[in-house]
């Protein structure tokens, strides 16, 4: 049992961080109301999926869950992604490519 628990420690940690973040966001939304601040997207379902993807990519050594969640988010928001790509400034595209390249390099060197 101890081996299974240690094996899944990063999954539990990522899940815990996601649950804490979600709880905090819901409390803040009840107190302040993101909609009243002009930030209704903060509490949308697809944004929650993006939060989960980022947290699982950050905390879990096996990146497959985070990548799957991120892929689902991208599919659900393909219109947003296409519109953002259409409005890319001259610096955003190279910066994005650099960030993705660095992330892939470090992910490949971990395994």
Image (tube, rainbow, N blue to C red):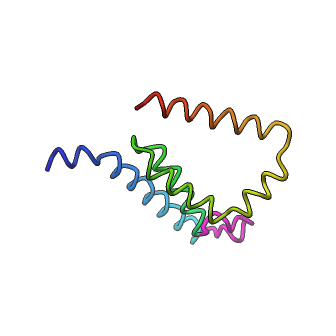
User: In the rendered view, does 73 fall on the left or right side of 66?
Assistant: right
> In which quadrant will I find the C terminus?
top left
Residue sitting at 68 percent across and 32 percent down?
98
Taking the spot 43% from the left edge, 52% from the top edge, the residue there is 17
Note whether 57 is above or below 23 in the view shown: above
The percent position of residue 104, horizontal first and vertical second, equals 55, 35
- Judge left or right: residue 85 versus residue 100: right
Q: Position of residue 84 (x, y in %)?
A: 78, 54
Can you give x and y, in whole percent of width and height, for residue 36 in the image? 71, 71
In the rendered image, which quarter is residue 96 located in? top right
Residue at x-position 48% and y-position 32%: 108
Q: 79 or 23, which lies in front?
A: 79
Q: Is residue 40 magenta?
A: yes
Residue 25 drawn in magenta: no
Is 16 situated above or below 97?
below
Residue at 40% x, 50% y is 14
Residue 88 image offset from top left, x and y in percent: 82, 46
Q: In this view, which residue lies farthest toward the left?
A: 1
Query: Taken as a whole, is the magenta stretch helix, strand or loop?
Result: loop
Closest to the observer, 49 or 77: 77
* Count of marks, rendered view: 0
Which residue extends farthest top?
Answer: 109
Q: Using the image as rendered, state which of residue 29 and residue 84 is in the foreground.
A: 84
Q: Which residues are magenta?
A: 31-44
Q: Is residue 32 left or right of residue 16?
A: right
């Amino acid at each position: 049992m101890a081996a299974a628990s240690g094996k899944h420690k990063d999954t539990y940690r990522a899940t815990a961080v996601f649950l804490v973040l979600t709880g905090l966001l819901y409390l803040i939304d009840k107190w302040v109301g993101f909609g009243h601040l002009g930030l209704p997207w903060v509490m949308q379902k697809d944004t929650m999926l993006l939060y989960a993807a980022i947290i699982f990519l950050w905390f879990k050594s096996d990146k497959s869950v985070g990548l799957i969640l991120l892929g689902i988010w991208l599919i659900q928001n393909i219109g947003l992604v296409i519109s953002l790509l259409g409005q890319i400034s001259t610096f955003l595209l190279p910066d994005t490519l650099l960030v993705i390249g660095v992330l892939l390099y470090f992910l490949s060197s971990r395994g």
